[in-house]
Image (cartoon, rainbow, N blue to C red):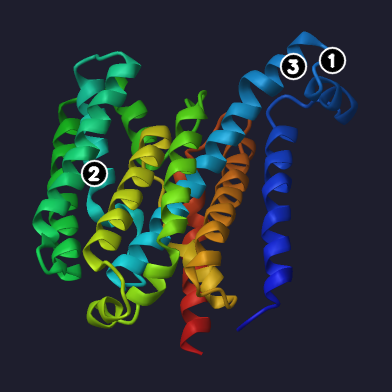
Amino acid sequence: MSVNRRALVMLVLLAVPASLAIAVWNGSVDIPSPRLLAALFGGGDAIDREILWGLRAPRALSAFACGALLALAGTLLQALLRNPLADPFLLGISGGAAAGSLTGMLVGAALALQHVFAFAGAAFAAASVFAFSLRPSGWNAYRVILAGVALSAGFGAVVSLLLSLAPAAQVHGMLFWLMGDLSGATNPLPAWIVLGITAVLAQFQAAPLDLLALGDDKARSLGVAVLAAQSITFGCASLATMAAVLLAGSIGFVGLVTPHLLRLLGVHHHRLLLPLSAATGGSMLTIADTLARSIQAPVGLPVGIVTALIGVPVLLVLLARMRG
């Protein structure tokens, strides 16, 4: 299946402001459009401005940044490993962050310190995969996958242990974090900074990634510094995944489904695939988070549940279309 490339780019670019507009226009408090527009430009009621700029806008921007980071990481990992099943959580980074964050919760650490624990766990996972997988001759995709699976299993056991030791009052918050939740995402700026850095670095790797798809030896014969390209790609994917997990916990399927969807629509070159994946993933997660906080408003659902419920059938349909 292939579509007009220019039309696809326009559609994705229109989806970005549309998804953000839908996110700030919807919430548990019904604000008429004229009042919301007034608050958008700094006028109107103070309560409306607080709801818009203090609650809805930061969460919408956080959701978009998180989705863009996950989609970008998924695209990079699928290219690096030449494996269509690769996704941001294959490396065990999510498990490491979860073990760290839940440890912080269990010992009663402040929120900022919980983020430090989560970052330490995620960084340990990324460094471990890097150490096990890198060889002087280049990357070994099988070692990356096996190391990631082993670390994920180990961190999963640690998470289960922490849940069994945690007091009942803490388990609810821990489970929300594990399912992916944006209710506490009030400062999207760090995630946007990481998104900007990783997007720029990844874009510089677009041409080498296209050549790496031909195989390491072929890419090397065409002038690609294979080891450097693979290391930068791994670093960008790891950094993007860490930023997304620290912001919202474990949110699945965005990084796996988004690149597949765009490839099915005829986008294969990474010069276009990388930015379109980030924009599409950001828009998808923004809409999913809007649904998560609107379905049972004022009670919100973890957005990870919504992405899983939508992602599973979408992935199955994509697989069926690819088989056809």
Alpha-carbon span between mark 1 and mark 3: 8 Å
In this rendered view, identify the residue nearer to me: 115 or 161: 115
Give coordinates of residue 307: x percent, y percent. 49, 52
Sequence-first tag of 2 and 3: 3
Q: Amino acid at mark 1?
A: Gly
- Labelled disc at residue 43: 1
Q: Amino acid at mark 3?
A: Arg
Judge from the rendering whether residue 74 lies leftward or rightward of residue 18; answer left or right.
left
Where does the N terminus fall, quadrant-wise? bottom right
Give coordinates of residue 164: x percent, y percent. 17, 32
Asked if disc 2 and disc 1 are in contact, CB closer than 8 Å, the reply is no
- Labelled disc at residue 95: 2
Q: Nearer the viewer, mark 2 or mark 1?
A: 1
Give coordinates of residue 212: x percent, y percent. 32, 74
Q: Amino acid at mark 2?
A: Gly
Judge from the rendering whether residue 186 lies leftward or rightward of residue 158; answer left or right.
right
Judge from the rendering whether residue 1 lies leftward or rightward of residue 35; answer left or right.
left
The residue where tag 3 is placed is 49
